[in-house]
Image: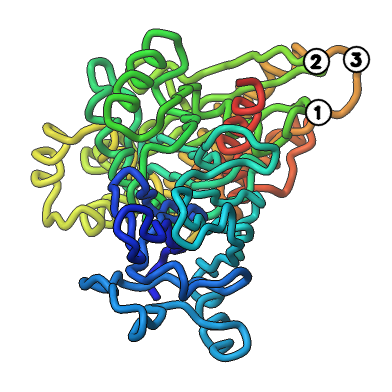
């Protein structure tokens, strides 16, 4: 049957007395998600009756002009061919029931068939003639398709959803964090991931609205540059770029207050106070800070390995672990690797440090505890913006503080000792940043 809803737009022979098919290309609507396209059926009007189900099929390539031999191509009478409808409903229910309008056997008006019901259409819209209308009679519009995008330094996640914030599909890919002058590169990575998510949801880009939370885009100039690049790439018609932790705040607390600390490639913390104001700490990049983040932790591990090699610190298995992780043989190989390593490559060492700490490697454990101190300080700074003495909800996001991570355990212990107001939720990896972006996109659509 194909993935379409078909109905005939027929001329009952006003000019030459024969049943004839309109084949004007302007009647075509392409399928997008729950949408459908009009697929013309080459069959005479007299063979289609009100309340028949029309299931999509390939158009017949020859005109059926002999009335005595006319048979419906894909039409099934409800009582005689009912088995066609369950199959159609199983294939996204691209089925319509039709009613006749302005019936004239051979008159000038022709016999217009109107699709008055489309199974599987959640918005209740109907197809009338060759147009699509809303239930209230409004203009034709494609149902809103939204994208929630988490553009991080280590990975990119895109979710496709509707205006109620429901997730329809999800895809992930490599990092696409915003770098100075790198808006087009970031947009190219996001486009690849967005296309895969759109394919899963059976939609085509551009989406109606995309809300992007991007690492490295916490300030207006970077946000504007990335938004322009994403729009130019054809990802969405309307693009709003915000800081990556802002979308994680929405995922963790909705519109409520709280502090969110993010430890991924870098580190940053955001707070939303009870009066709705936003505050931030950290997030200044690997050259200025990002203490407690992936690059910082990887860099610290490299330094510890070098100092142990020189006998300045106790020997450990950390150097051997790093060599294995990088596929290297000697410390000299490691020196050559670091000469060209990018911040993202250094940050990719952090999970190996966490694994070593979890297995009892003392040098790695000290590095993790130092990272927890840095992250706890970000929380401590932001809790000063909360008046009174009420408990403050704290959530975590980022690959380094997932459930079971020794860094999350160390951070919880540090907050318990130094910040009695902080209440670290057992969220860990459940803070789903792209879903937070999707919620914000739905809110943005509501203000349009």
Q: Identify which residue is drawn at 58% across, 74% down.
A: 52
CA neighbours of label 2 inside 10 A, class few (<14), some (14 to 19), many (20+):
some
The local crowd at label 1, few if under 14, some if 14 to 19, many if 20 or more residues have their Cα within 10 Å, is some
Up-down relation of residue 377 to residue 405 (above or below)? above
Position of 210 relative to 448 (above/below): below
Quadrant where the C terminus is found in the figure: top right
Residue 364 badge:
none
Residue 352 appears in the rendering: no
Residue 158 position, x and y percent, is 44, 44
Q: In the drawing, what numbered circle is on residue 388?
A: 3
Tell me the colour scheme of the image: rainbow
The quarter holding residue 375 reads top right
The residue lying toward the viewer, choosing from 300 and 350, is 350
Q: Secondary structure at mark 3?
A: loop
- In terms of secondary structure, where does tag 1 sit? strand
Across and down, in percent, residue 211 comes to 50, 30
> Which residue is at 27% across, 51% downward?
322
């Amino acid at each position: 049957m194909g993935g379409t809803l078909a109905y005939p737009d027929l001329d009952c022979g006003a000019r030459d007395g024969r049943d004839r098919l309109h084949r004007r290309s302007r009647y075509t609507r392409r399928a997008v998600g729950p949408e459908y396209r009009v697929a013309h059926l080459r069959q005479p009007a007299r063979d289609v009756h009100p309340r028949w189900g029309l299931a999509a099929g390939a158009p017949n390539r020859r005109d059926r002009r002999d009335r005595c031999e006319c048979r419906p191509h894909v039409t099934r009478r409800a009582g005689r061919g009912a088995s066609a409808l369950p199959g159609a409903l199983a294939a996204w229910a691209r089925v319509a029931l039709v009613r006749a309008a302005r019936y004239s056997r051979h008159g000038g008006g022709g016999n217009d068939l109107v699709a008055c019901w489309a199974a599987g259409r959640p918005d209740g819209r109907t197809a009338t003639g060759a147009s699509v209308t809303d239930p209230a009679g409004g203009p034709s519009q494609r149902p809103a398709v939204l994208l929630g995008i988490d553009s991080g330094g280590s990975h990119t996640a895109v979710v496709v959803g509707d205006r109620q914030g429901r997730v329809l599909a999800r895809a992930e890919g490599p990092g696409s964090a915003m770098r100075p002058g790198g808006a087009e590169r970031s947009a190219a990575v996001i486009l690849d991931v967005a296309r895969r998510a759109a394919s899963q949801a059976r939609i085509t880009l551009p989406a109606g609205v995309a809300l992007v939370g991007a690492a490295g885009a916490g300030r207006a100039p970077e946000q504007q540059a990335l938004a322009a690049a994403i729009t130019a790439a054809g990802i969405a018609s309307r693009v709003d770029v915000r800081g990556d932790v802002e979308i994680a705040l929405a995922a963790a607390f909705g519109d409520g207050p709280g502090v969110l600390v993010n430890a991924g490639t870098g580190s940053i913390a955001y707070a939303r106070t009870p009066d709705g104001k936003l505050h931030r700490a950290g997030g200044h990049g690997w050259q200025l800070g990002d203490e407690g983040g992936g690059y910082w932790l990887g860099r610290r591990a490299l330094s510890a390995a070098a100092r142990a090699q020189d006998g300045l610190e106790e020997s450990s298995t950390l150097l051997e672990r790093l060599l294995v992780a990088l596929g290297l043989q000697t410390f000299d190989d490691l020196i050559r690797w670091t000469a060209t390593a990018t911040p993202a490559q250094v940050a990719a060492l952090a999970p190996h440090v966490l694994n070593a700490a979890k297995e009892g490697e003392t040098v790695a454990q000290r590095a993790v505890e130092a990272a927890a101190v840095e992250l706890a300080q970000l929380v401590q700074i932001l809790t000063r913006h909360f008046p009174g003495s009420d408990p403050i909800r704290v959530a975590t996001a980022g690959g380094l503080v997932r459930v079971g991570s020794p860094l999350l355990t160390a951070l919880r212990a540090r907050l318990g000792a130094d910040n009695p107001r902080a209440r670290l939720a057992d969220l860990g990896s459940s803070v789903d940043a792209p879903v937070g972006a999707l919620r914000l996109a739905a809110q943005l659509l509501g203000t349009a």
